[in-house]
Amino acid sequence: MLALKAAIEWANTANEDVSIWSDSESSLRALKSFNVKSKITQEAQMILLENARIRLGWVKAHIGIKGNEIEDTLAKEATTDGIPASLPFPKRFLKKQLLQLSLSRWQAEWDNGETGRSIYSIIPKISNKQLHWSRECIQFATGHGPFPSNLKRFGLHSTDYCGCGEIGNPLHYATR
């Protein structure tokens, strides 16, 4: 598609009718398509819409058509000797890379953080997937539920001890 776009750009500067022949059926189909996400293809389409003097055609590959054989030879040389073309990354790729970087940084902060350690022992690996925990499970895991140890912190209970005389925290209620 990149070579075809370059040919279309060149033809756009010519002050005469130009026919461009390509053996790339997929590129020619993409140029006819209405639903194109490729910026390169969209730019080529815009030139073609603005210049009716450029015509495209398909030619079968590797059957001895002199111009097409020369083009194939040049294309092969370009893959080894040519100037590297700078193509923008697709948005989908960039979004995936950004998500992976964000998750990696978030994991590092979670591993080395000082807060949330009671949850860290339950969920050591972060994820962007939603967890479906009940309110009670969250309170139990964080210790922020109706436990004497939590209620005393806020002055809502006179002591942080359970009726049996031990500290009334989630671990106590889970193991006694």
Image: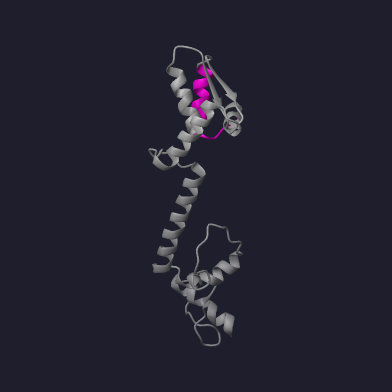
Whether residue 59 is visible: yes
- Image coords of residue 111 (percent x, y): 42, 68
Q: Residue at x 43, y 55 (%)?
A: 101
Q: Residue furthest bottom?
A: 165
Decide: is 17 above or below 176.
above
Q: Residue at x 48, y 79 (%)?
A: 160
Q: Residue at x 51, y 86 (%)?
A: 166
Quadrant hosting residue 87: top left
- Image coords of residue 129 (percent x, y): 56, 58
Q: Where does the magenta region start and end? A: 35-50
Decide: is 36 above or below 17.
below
Q: Nearer the viewer, residue 62 or 84?
A: 62
Q: Main secondary structure of the magenta part?
A: helix
- Image coords of residue 139 (percent x, y): 55, 68
Q: Nearer the viewer, residue 144 or 14?
A: 14
Whether residue 88 is visible: no
Decide whether residue 114 is among the magenta residues.
no
